[in-house]
Image (cartoon, rainbow, N blue to C red):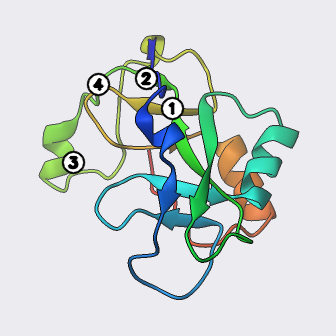
Amino acid sequence: MSTISYDCDLKRYNDFKIAAGKKWADVLGFYDSTNVVISDRVKMALEDHNVRGWGSFPINIIGFEDKKYHAFFPVTVAGKITNLEAIFNYETEKREFDVSTWNGDEVFTNAETLNIVCTEKVKDLLESIKATNIEFSPY
């Protein structure tokens, strides 16, 4: 298990523009990457329920300063996915990894992936607050 440091220029130069779309949701994706931002509402829910394994920092959305969003990222890295061949051959949708490489944090990523993984606890929490624009896949 390892952790990710997000001490980067993005925290200091964090002005963003809306590239596409007109609807506001709890989870917004970046136009050209797999990164996401979360609403204040989602951030507070994660904090209030002591969800571990993630980090965030506030961002500014140019022209929409009243909207409060935070860049969201997993800070814990578990082992590689071990059944990629079966996934690529459509034999399964579930991802497998060596659980001994995971420290138990409720949010994490797997080594060599861009996946954001969460436990059933986090999925249930986000569904209970009816978080918008988020989809869960079997893991």
- Mark earlier in primary sequence (4, 1): 4
Q: Which residue is mark 4?
A: 80
Front tag of 4 and 1 = 1
- Mark earlier in primary sequence (2, 3): 2
Q: Which residue is mark 3?
A: 87
Callout 1, which amino acid?
Answer: Phe
Q: Are marks 2 and 1 in contact (CB under 8 Å)?
A: yes
- Mark earlier in primary sequence (1, 3): 3
- Secondary structure, mark 1, is strand
Front tag of 3 and 4 = 4
**Alpha carbon separation for disc pair 3 and 4:** 14 Å
For label 3, count other residues whose C-alpha is less than 10 Å away and answer few (under 14), some (14-19) or many (20+): some
Q: Which residue is mark 1?
A: 108
**Alpha carbon separation for disc pair 1 and 3:** 20 Å
Callout 4, which amino acid?
Answer: Lys
Say which of 95 and 113 sits in front: 113
Q: Position of residue 134 (x, y in %)?
A: 55, 65
Q: Are marks 2 and 3 in contact (CB under 8 Å)?
A: no
- Secondary structure, mark 3, is helix
Q: Which residue is mark 2?
A: 77
Give the residue at x 21% y 48%: 87
Callout 2, which amino acid?
Answer: Val
Q: Position of residue 11 (x, y in %)?
A: 52, 39
Query: Which quadrant would the N terminus be assigned to in this image?
Result: top left
Callout 3, which amino acid?
Answer: Ile
Q: Quadrant of residue 47?
A: top right
For label 2, count other residues whose C-alpha is less than 10 Å away and answer few (under 14), some (14-19) or many (20+): many
Q: Position of residue 36 (x, y in %)?
A: 48, 55
Using residue 101 as the reference point, say whether residue 130 is left or right of it: right
